[in-house]
Amino acid sequence: MATGFRNRIRQKNIEDSGFGNNASGRFIRKDGLPNVERKGVNILNRLSWYHTMLELSTAQFLSYLVIGYILINLFFALIYYTIGVEHLTGIDKSDPVNEFIDVFFFSSQTFTTVGYGRIAPVGFMASLVATFEAFLGLLAFAIATGLFYGRFSRPRAYLKFSDVALVAPFQDVTGLMFRLAPFKNNALTSAEVVVSTAIEINENGDAKAQFYTLKTHLSHINTLALNWTVVHKIDEDSPFFGFTKEDFKNNKIEIIVHVRAFDEVFSNTVVQRASYISKEIVFGAKFVPMYYPAKDNQSTVLDLDKINEYKEVEMPILVSEE
Amino acid sequence: MATGFRNRIRQKNIEDSGFGNNASGRFIRKDGLPNVERKGVNILNRLSWYHTMLELSTAQFLSYLVIGYILINLFFALIYYTIGVEHLTGIDKSDPVNEFIDVFFFSSQTFTTVGYGRIAPVGFMASLVATFEAFLGLLAFAIATGLFYGRFSRPRAYLKFSDVALVAPFQDVTGLMFRLAPFKNNALTSAEVVVSTAIEINENGDAKAQFYTLKTHLSHINTLALNWTVVHKIDEDSPFFGFTKEDFKNNKIEIIVHVRAFDEVFSNTVVQRASYISKEIVFGAKFVPMYYPAKDNQSTVLDLDKINEYKEVEMPILVSEE
Amino acid sequence: MATGFRNRIRQKNIEDSGFGNNASGRFIRKDGLPNVERKGVNILNRLSWYHTMLELSTAQFLSYLVIGYILINLFFALIYYTIGVEHLTGIDKSDPVNEFIDVFFFSSQTFTTVGYGRIAPVGFMASLVATFEAFLGLLAFAIATGLFYGRFSRPRAYLKFSDVALVAPFQDVTGLMFRLAPFKNNALTSAEVVVSTAIEINENGDAKAQFYTLKTHLSHINTLALNWTVVHKIDEDSPFFGFTKEDFKNNKIEIIVHVRAFDEVFSNTVVQRASYISKEIVFGAKFVPMYYPAKDNQSTVLDLDKINEYKEVEMPILVSEE
Amino acid sequence: MATGFRNRIRQKNIEDSGFGNNASGRFIRKDGLPNVERKGVNILNRLSWYHTMLELSTAQFLSYLVIGYILINLFFALIYYTIGVEHLTGIDKSDPVNEFIDVFFFSSQTFTTVGYGRIAPVGFMASLVATFEAFLGLLAFAIATGLFYGRFSRPRAYLKFSDVALVAPFQDVTGLMFRLAPFKNNALTSAEVVVSTAIEINENGDAKAQFYTLKTHLSHINTLALNWTVVHKIDEDSPFFGFTKEDFKNNKIEIIVHVRAFDEVFSNTVVQRASYISKEIVFGAKFVPMYYPAKDNQSTVLDLDKINEYKEVEMPILVSEE
């Protein structure tokens, strides 16, 4: 029946989605990034290690730092040990283990430039290695400083999207709607949303994805302080016109959302993307409000836990055109 | 009487203000941020600690750093003390208090990596803790570096707004006006202003805020070096057309101002917002000039202290339409 | 005769220059910043110390750092000296001067966290002060790091403007032209220029500046790699239409230039301004080319020293309209 | 025959390319930067050392740091040596070489602020120099920190362009096409491409470059996750209309490409340029696809090694207009 689509969708499909017709799987992953694997060239050229470091979780990032710190110290401890502990003053020479332990801590005291001096290098080789370890230590922390700053100064939209999109009566027709809300103490203004959809269509046998723009009732909002329910009216101009609950369920449909806003704290444009596939579209349901006046009536409360709350509504019987 | 508004205001209200009709209190706080409280999710996810650190006053920020520094040292001092002072050389063992004091200072000398060495760790445990304290210290200052930079490199408009908006005769009609001026040595160009208003209207009992755009006589300015008096002409196209002094006083009106400019020092777009509620609107007054030629006639002087100076003017009798 | 202007200039003057009519002196200083002095509020609120630090010359900036470093050490040396040298180990007690010198160097060794330990604090007070000096030292260098980065990462256009603007025959009429060229190894693209002029006009006695837009023959350029000669055609649509050499000389005229481009290295928009007053306008002269093919004919050479080179040209006799 | 062009190319040439008609060699180097040498002013004013540092390869950058580190230490070692080793404690005085070695390492221990203290300054001069070396060391690492951050936080497009442009049948006519693909883990959206061409035309003897805009079939793409094949249709509106294989081969033609996109990780606009000269244009060839569904059909694979793969195609015989 999917072939029926071809004739039913009268809208012109867009060519500039950037995704190919025979790309497979969902196009935008739930985390908002395009669902593409890159191969070829070598991994080092393919990865921007800075982008990678920025996208690590704080836990991962910190553990990498600690592990790196330990490995570097072990590495230098080994070198000092090979050079010979007699080139370091104040080493506890009671037994090899204690020797190595002291050498290890000397290394860390050099790398961090704390340099107590209880253990200090004597002679050329040990001093030379220490000279470069201290230098390396400072560069390492110079890089760490940059990474920390890069991580927490990175402009982000901090938007929470509803897990599902809903289809419900809207004005005189039906509408496909989802909602989003800023969940951090940033200040977003002049937010814009661009919504498109990919519908898989069978053409003499093989499935091809076609892309269509979904017009939204409001595509711009001045101050994004409360939640924003984005609505696409399913009227004659919509590729979904005449779609039944089954059409949404049984076919490969993906709603692609792109939000762009200006963060007044970062003074920077921020963007965030989301996507809804067939099984994330609920037919015949509408959202319940998620904000209300504060008790003192002096401000408004936005309850972020309510973002996914919706209740069923009766849908008008659609006259399917098949 | 407020119901009278409904019929009197002929302008189409805007839907993209981002504020709901049943939001309460003033919409934009005097500091320019939206008057919304967020709840739900947990506080940690709801707060961007970086945004928070950026918005602290310098005094708060510095005291947080100092307090943190002391607490961390107390924490580590406790650990060293538990491990035993015999694992630190050069401790004043005269009595427990002196011991703890020396241990505390050893901690600080490690955390800051100053490491005099008069007190130095001996043995595994103490050295290990010291190793990680020094590491932690460097990371802490890496973060501090980022925060300092983030704080003072954060692009801001540095605009001073007049405390009140005035209604005065302007050209052939009356105008609602307020003024703003840059108060720091930054260089703002191509400044734009967007003004809208929220008017509370009674509809069969319950109050609903309606939003309207306020056209401005000049909405763009090339170089924002002197003060800028923004004027909204109250003519047929204004939602305030026919408003009397009482209308402004007795009803819930809020003027929402949004200024965007380009800072040539930061090479970045900066924005600032302001808002005026009913009791901040003065009827029948106009601003006195706040700039004048310098004595040597070779430059212009902008006197920021004058920004709130205005004098009463006679208003034409408005034929109220009620 | 200046009154003659009023009738002669048919163009509509612009209101959004941002400069007042009775502002005095040149509007844009030769360095491109608006010629405005701010007073009122207090100096600390009026100065963004960060903007100030960014605009210092490298020499000034570095000497401030050095002076600050010395003063801080003197300050702390004094404190340690007051506490008593007996609370510092390893002090040369031969005489008060040597004592103070050693105390001073102890301070610097603490502030920089180098902490040799030859001199080290003993007892509570000295250790406490040292603890905070080391802390202060690290914060100071955290700030210095931010300032260094802020200074050299600050996006700038690095444009060189010709010292004078020329009036020469251009196409079928005459043109007012000046030129600019990038003088550093940055890569500017999609450059735009906006030119306006302020002409002082006598109105029943008092002089008022009127602002006019100057249309340019080309207002946009794709790649700003060579020099760009910006030309304003003095035709019927120009406020300068019919101006004689004397008109340019004897009247208060200022050409205000605003260039905006995208720096591909900073990935940031950069702007630069310039201004030409009457005595910087040369009547009857045209620029000589400043670029030519390289010897090997494989690239083009831009000679920045030629930017101000021009030669006289004969001007058509203008039929003055007075 | 090149003169034939003049009459054949009906399109209006553009004036805002920013390149002069008598500039020589290719306009945009293969690395995307304009092919211009600057002379005049002095080298220091002409070079932005920061831009230079940012464009160094990592290897160069690091070796500069190491070399600088060694030179600075040699320099200070010399000073300490001149002052006299008796002003440093703990020096190995066995022979001059050992003395110098110890002095050198003392310098490095001061510059890095590791300050073990085994060697420490005594007396005024040595302490004074050490004081400033430690200060210098911290500033040096402050600058290094800024450079590291500037280097890896610098927004770049990370686009790979096909080495050649192809001319192949496209829709009902022929098209000139090249392709590009993001090769790192950044996320580019709303990418735009601007293509122009420089054609050298003989005019009564001397060769002049004329610039023309090349319209592209698609000039904007929403998500730049897969490769993008940019196509210029060679129809009546193209300056290449009627060009034969020989015309492309025998004449000085350069295709100039400018891509601009938004990087969602940097939250910044990034640009990249490329250029194709005559010998980089292949007549009668089309690209082979470089992406395909992943095995699990759950995502798409982009094979970057395929970017230059093309196969020959038969070209319709063009009726040359000469």
Image (cartoon, coloured by chain):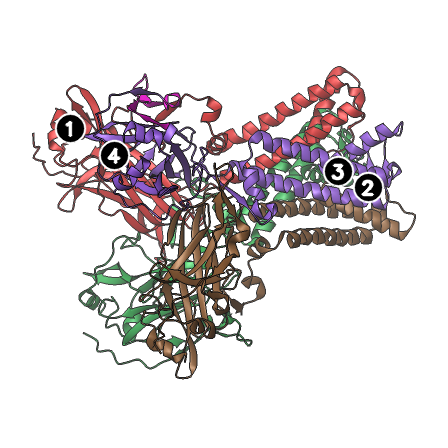
Chain colours: A green, B brown, C purple, D red
What chain does badge 1 belong to? D
Q: Secondary structure at mark 2?
A: loop
Which one is in front, C56 or B238?
Answer: B238
User: Which quadrant of the rendered structure holds the C terminus of chain D?
Assistant: top left
Instruction: Give the extent of the magenta segment.
Output: C280-308
- The chain letter under disc 4 is C
Secondary element under disc 3, as helix, strand or loop, is helix
Left or right: B49 in relation to D5: right
Find numbered disc 1 in the image and state the secondary structure of the residue it sits on. helix
Looking at the picture, does residue A212 appear above or below residue D292? below
* Real-space Cα separation, disc 2 to disc 3, in angstroms: 15 Å
Residue that lies at the very extreme toward the right in this rendered image = B94
How many residues crowd around disc 1 within 10 Å: few (fewer than 14), some, or many (20 or more)? Answer: few
Tags 2 and 1 touching, CB below 8 Å: no
Q: Are dots 3 and 1 on a single chain?
A: no
Single out the mark in the foreground, 4 or 3.
Answer: 4
Q: Identify the amino acid type marked 2.
A: Ile
x, y (%) of residue C311? Answer: 30, 19
Residue occupying the far bottom of the picture = B204
CA gap, disc 4 and disc 3: 66 Å
Distance (Cα) linking label 4 and label 2: 79 Å
The quarter of the picture where the N terminus of chain D appears is top left
- Residue D116 magenta-highlighted: no
Q: Amino acid at mark 4?
A: Lys
Question: Toward the viewer: A59 or D32?
Answer: D32
Residue found 77% across the figure and 16% down from its top? D95
Task: Look at mark 1 in the image and give the residue it sits on.
Answer: D246
Q: Residue under circle 2?
A: B119
Kindly identify which residue carries mark 3: C110
Asked whether the residues under marks 2 and 1 belong to the same chain, the reply is no
Mark in the foreground, 4 or 2:
4
